[in-house]
Amino acid sequence: MMLETPSLPPRLIHLPGGLRLLDEQTDKIVLQLHARKPYATMATPEYSQVYATVAQIGLPTIGVEFLTLDTLRGVAAPDWQVASPSQGFALRAERNAWSQVRTLAQKDGRDFDADLANRAVTYLDLAAIRLLDLSNCYSRVLIAFDHDSDARQKIGILYRDGFVTALEAAIHAFAADAASFRDLIVEAAWRLLKLGDQEVRKIGKFCQFYKSKIGTNPIGDALWSVARDGWLGQFSNLRDDITHAAPIGGRGIRDCTVRAHQLGKSIVPRLHYPLFGSDGKLFDDSLYADFSDDARARATMKRYVFWSDGAVDALDYAWQVTDKLVALLGQVRIASGIRGEMPTITDKDITGPVVIGRG
């Protein structure tokens, strides 16, 4: 009997700015806004080369949905995988590694390790979901923009619709869960690398207690460095601004910009939600807002547009921070030497009749 290569599922590749690429395993792949709005087609490369091919046109892959009939019908959760800027599907690999750590820890009766690994798996799952939600919100805002016949003729304008509120909620949820993920990494490093006798489960405690231990552990030193003056410290400040000072949507002017993305001879719209400026801070409405007359209102909007043009995009930032958190968690796991084991099922685990359902 000859074995046939199984057919590969269609892929919906999430790109920056709310754009999508559909790979249905035909002779072409389609850059689109949605099924009825294709922007460009190109010859389908080898299955493993699709992501690199798309990156060549300036659109890196944020993640990919593998489409099945059940996911399209909405009776199964999206089969969604986050893509790393440089490490492929690193989040999925890290999740699998911690799942195996959990299996062995439960088997050996190491309750703390099992609990830590279980929370690591949970936060990795949440990180993927938050990015999917944020990417989908970008897509919805861009679709609404395209549906507005007046707006879509003016790429580059500020734009806001009802979906922007959902986008802002997704940013808030990302910041909250990513902060919890950050604190889990700190706790894992402190306990698994035996950095001290104190109980440390928050980034603030880590910075307080590790100050006197700098130079004793390379992973601890690296974590201290990024937590104090690096990307992790910047994220912590941003998270505090969002969750403690005011929600994103409660800061006055918070409009998106629809930017032009050059694709060959065509112009493709791409959504930009400005999260923070070059100084690392959120837009401070109190410094800019003055709508007391027409002239001041125009000046206010001009300053906001200038700030927005140079601001970091929310989806790009969330994607990059997630990738760095995943990498940091992996460094802690590897440095600690904690082991894992694939779960096994034997006849003893079967306690009733075997029922075979749909895959």
Image (cartoon, grey):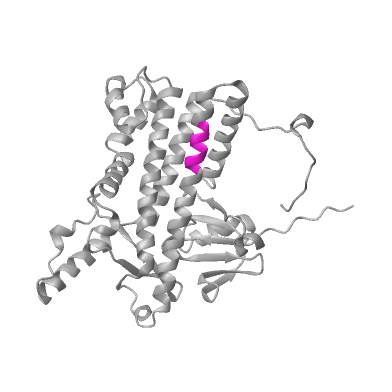
**Residue 258 in the figure: left or right of residue 8:** left
Residue that extends furthest to the right in the rendered view of this protein: 1
Q: Which stretch appears magenta? A: 117-124
Q: Residue shown at 38%/78% (left/top)?
A: 152
**Residue 21 in the figure: left or right of residue 177:** right
| Residue 174 can be seen in this image | yes
Q: Residue shown at 66%/68% (left/top)?
A: 26
Residue 5's spot in the image, x, y percent? 76, 55
Residue 2's spot in the image, x, y percent? 86, 53
Residue 306's spot in the image, x, y percent? 22, 65
Q: Main secondary structure of the magenta part?
A: helix
In the image shown, does 193 or 56 lie closer to the viewer? 193
**Residue 195 in the figure: left or right of residue 87:** left
Within the image, what quadrant is residue 249 found in? bottom left
Residue that extends furthest to the front in the rendered view of this protein: 352
In the image shown, does 156 or 115 lie closer to the viewer? 115
Q: How many marks?
A: 0
In this rendering, the answer to whether 13 lies above or below 30 is above
In this rendering, the answer to whether 146 lies above or below 355 is below
Q: Is residue 115 magenta?
A: no
